Image: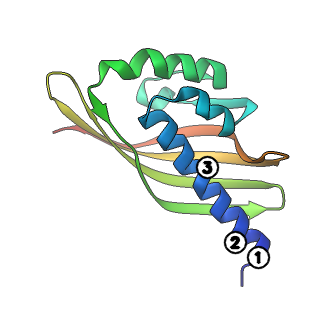
Amino acid sequence: MLSIEEISARLEIQQVLTDYSTAVDSARFDDLDAVFTTDAVVDYSVMGGIVGGPVEVKAWLAEVLPSFSAYCHLLGNHDIRVDGATATTRTLCLNPMQTPDTSTFLIGLWYADTWLLTDDGWRIRTRTLEKCFDKQL
């Protein structure tokens, strides 16, 4: 049986995962400061992106996402493993992205994250994308 602490941690982690998607989908990249630790390493390379810290990630997202006319994140299949003040997660993301000429791509990926419980709550320490599929519709 899960303890109240673990249930709370899982719910808090799930909220931060949603906060990431909301920040990116609404182009509020400074909101990512409440998602990542200041020394986090984010690896988007499997999908053709950068590897960097939160500052580099925010700048890169602000540069590349305007080339899409629409995009969103749909998260699911949360595998959350809590171990005291650390955790690991693997989360499925379906990410449709539309270009200005209305070409639509559907990207399926996994977010593999490590977490740290900070004074400000749960934060992602490392994020690595694992490609599932990408398909032009």
Around disc 2, counting alpha carbons within 10 Å, would you say few (fewer than 14), some (14 to 19), or many (20 or more)? few
Q: Is residue 77 left or right of residue 123?
A: left
Residue on which disc 2 sits = 7
Give the mark nearer the N terminus: 3 vs 2: 2
Disc number at residue 38? none
Q: Is residue 11 above or below residue 129?
A: below
Instruction: Inspect the image, locate mark 3, and give the three-letter code of the amino acid beneath it.
Output: Val
The residue closer to the viewer here, 50 or 63, is: 63
Q: Residue at x 57, y 30 (%)?
A: 43
Instruction: Inspect the image, locate mark 1, and give the three-letter code of the amino acid beneath it.
Output: Ile
Q: Residue at x 65, y 40 (%)?
A: 35
Residue on which disc 1 sits = 4
Instruction: Inspect the image, locate mark 2, and give the three-letter code of the amino acid beneath it.
Output: Ile
Find numbered disc 2 in the image and state the secondary structure of the residue it sits on: helix
- The quarter of the picture where residue 57 lies is top right
- The answer for how far apart the CA atoms under marks 2 and 1 are is 5 Å
- Can residue 53 be spotted in the picture? no
Around disc 1, counting alpha carbons within 10 Å, would you say few (fewer than 14), some (14 to 19), or many (20 or more)? few
Whole-percent x and y of residue 69? 26, 26
Does the residue at mark 2 contact the one at mark 1 (Cβ under 8 Å)? yes
Give the mark nearer the N terminus: 1 vs 3: 1
- The quarter of the picture where residue 38 lies is top right
Q: Residue at x 42, y 30 (%)?
A: 47
Q: Is residue 73 left or right of residue 1?
A: left
Residue on which disc 3 sits = 16
Find numbered disc 3 in the image and state the secondary structure of the residue it sits on: helix
Quadrant including the C terminus: top left
Quadrant including the N terminus: bottom right
- The answer for how far apart the CA atoms under marks 1 and 3 are is 18 Å
